[in-house]
Amino acid sequence: MNVIESLKEMDILKLMNRASEITLKHHGDIITLERAVFLSWWCERGDCAFCYMSTQKPRIREPSKARRNVNAILAEAEICRRLGWNIEFLSGGYGSFSPEEIKEIAERIRDITGSPVWLNTGITTDLEIYGDEVAGITGALEVANPDLQRKLCPSKPLEDIAEMLEAARDLGFRRGITIILGLGETPDDLRYLFEFIGDLEIDRVTFYALNPHEGTVFENQPQPATLYYAGTVAATRIEFPDLEIITGTWMDNLGSIGPLVLSGANGITKFPLFKMFGTSYGKRVEEEVRWAGRRLAGTFTDVERLRRGRSYPEIDPFIERYVNGCLKNLKLL
């Protein structure tokens, strides 16, 4: 099957059916809930054309104040553990935390969750500092077409991302990339993505749909069509049966979850957990997965799991704040 031609011809159902068969054979029927844990809202580069942080950089006079309290980050990790969510990766703009600080945070999160974390903290040459607290390194590729990538992400050269991921491979880390759909790419550009995945032996791809942020050149651009998104994911799954695929969708587009799961997603991400827990939105996520014939590993509705967990004196006030925030919005039970 020529998946790029099938996508161009809009033969989406054929792609989805084949991708679903491959996913069940190679990965089973479990779907994970993933959450990117942000370290800071500051990015010293801050010039990616689509990024919310690019709109905030001129407004932040003291970057240190844009850093999150580390205890709040750790409390978020404990909430994820309670609810059976995976931490997709630690994410933060360039220059927000030093590698030594990121390493310490990763070690503490590993101690809380029992699992090493992925990093998505920018292009770096300091990978040797990390050990078994880190599972993998993510390159924010965003768009695989080299010309478009240079235009939209001028301070994140594709070549530097590839070099970092090659170094990560040499050090024994898993490798991941993020891709945003809706930035002006075409189905033909999948050839660049497939080459990048194959050449760098990528283990995980996170796909996102464009979220048009006010103040960016994309603010009036619609999100990509669900079937285009699903077809792109399905084409990628067919080409790379063993690849881990995470798909991100937004609270206003939860209906895309079912098609994305059937197209080969192993996990879903990009949800505002504390706004959606125990609400009709959270229940909708669970129902989308159920009606796709899959089983969800985490929960959006189990209040007992939310309340029951470990105690950490230094972070308990932050845990309580998150729990109360979830319960405040509780509308289902």
Image (tube, rainbow, N blue to C red):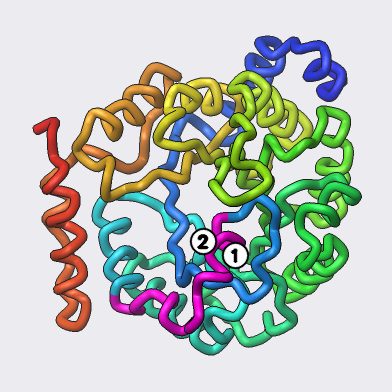
Location of residue 54 in the rendering, given as x and y in whole percent from the top left corner = 61, 62
Magenta segment, which residues? 52-71
Mark 2 sits on what residue? 89
Q: Can you tell which quarter of the image residue 131 is in?
A: bottom right
The local secondary structure at tag 1 comes to strand
Q: Which mark is residue 63?
A: none
Q: CA distance from mark 1 to mark 2?
A: 6 Å
Q: Residue 242's image quarter? A: top right
Establish if 230 lies above or below 44: above
| Quarter of the figure with the C terminus | top left
Residue at image position (87%, 43%) is 192
Query: Looking at the image, which is closer to me, 233 or 170?
Result: 233
User: Would you say residue 95 sits in the magenta stretch?
Assistant: no
- Tell me, yes or no, whether the highlighted magenta stretch contains residue 66: yes
Residues 161 and 128: in front is 161
Which residue has dot 1 on it?
120
Residue 93 visible in the snapshot: yes
Residue type, label 2: Phe
Residues tagged 1 and 2 counted as in contact (Cβ below 8 A): yes
What residue lies at 45% left-to-right and 19% top-to-bottom?
Answer: 292
Residue 85 to residue 139: above or below: above
Residue 80, x across and y down, in percent: 32, 56
Does residue 305 appear left or right of residue 55 in this picture? left
Residue sitting at x 80%, y 62%: 154
